[in-house]
Image (cartoon, rainbow, N blue to C red):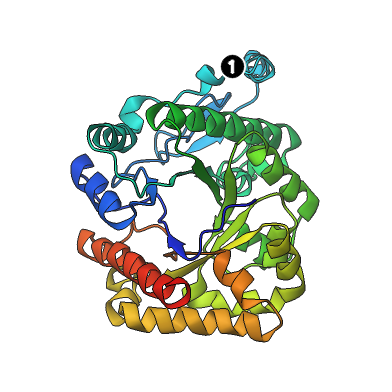
Amino acid sequence: MKFRPKLMAFALRSSPYRNVEEACRVVIRNFPEVLHAPGLAGQEGPSQGVGMPCLKVDKEKGGLSFELSGRESELVEFYERCLSDDLDYFAISPESETTLYRLAEIFKEKPWPELKLINFSVRGPYTAGFRLKDESGVPAFYNDTLRDVMVKQLAMTARWRQRKIKELFPNVPTLFYLTEPSLGVYSSAGGTMSWDVIKNAINEVIEGVEGITGIHCCDNFDWSLLMETNIDFINFDAYHYGYTMSLYTNELKKFLERGGMISWGIVPTTGASTGVADIENENPSSLVERLDQMIQLVVDRGIDKEMLLESSWVTPTCGCATLSVELADRVYAFTKEVSQRIRKKYFG
């Protein structure tokens, strides 16, 4: 039987914290059931570029791009590593995962019984391939060779990371998701390539990952397309776009019936520093009411309410890296409170 979260809470990796201990304690305090290793301010995602061949660093802009000319031997070695299933080639250094190792130490010293899942992520293939460019400045996702390289690198890195998490947290299952904010570009461009290409890339990345898998997209999107993939849950910005889920009820019904789940990003991560003071203007009561309204919109279109509630998570709309520490604290505390209140309302 598929896992049923029943409005359990979790959060995304990015955060404004700079201190490892502070970041870890915030996560433990607010998300003891679904733990994640928070990113530190200014820190790249741990999977960024690990094991990737033919990368070129732009020293002036600080970005990465691909450079294939004259570097064919790197491609050969990369594919040999993949074919031999050499996960260690894609290992992430402990220095890039300080919060993960510290969380493991804390848990080993004094385990808490509430812990049910470890949450981790890598950048999604479309977003990675849209941000990385080829030698001509074209998004790498549109190059068949580079797309294949990125998909395999993400898949191998995700598998390595899951293996490491299982070593650090024995017997604790994982929740894995791809961050795909750039999918909004696909929508706004009217679908400049076949959706099947993107779908196959997503499926290939998650194929080797055990347990619960999903996608985070904080932009408006055609959710029915994501329901065609092999993922288990969709994490979306329900605070701004919650009503859109009611537009795809036929597909949603099939998705839920096959064990799919919806992760309602109901706690806004937009604050005055981002130009919109959403989090300052809300409180747990107003957010519970807003989430209830979004759920009811979907139910009114014919979705079984009990099935939807049992298949729902509660999260922030996105990561908190752009917020101040004070507002990030507020986001996490509100997410915990909203989850507790609405779970009590529907599940006692």
299 w.r.t. 312: above or below: below
Answer with the quarter of the image where residue 208 lies: top right
325 w.r.t. 300: above or below: above
Determine the secondary structure under disc 1: loop
Crowding around mark 1 (Cα neighbors within 10 Å: few <14, some 14 to 19, many 20+) is: some
Q: Residue at point 46% right, 71% down?
A: 347
> Does residue 189 appear anywhere in the picture?
no
**Amino acid type of the residue that numbered disc 1 sits on in the rendered structure:** Asp
Q: How many marks?
A: 1
Question: In what quadrant of the picture does the C terminus appear?
Answer: bottom left
Residue 114 in the figure: left or right of residue 265: left
Q: Residue at point 65% right, 20% down?
A: 82
Residue 250 in the figure: left or right of residue 65: right
Residue 236 in the figure: left or right of residue 270: right
| Residue 263 point in image, percent of width and height | 53, 63
Residue tagged 1:
86
Residue 148 in the figure: left or right of residue 314: right
| Residue 248 point in image, percent of width and height | 71, 74
Q: Residue at point 47% right, 75% down?
A: 346
Q: Residue at point 34% right, 58% down?
A: 320
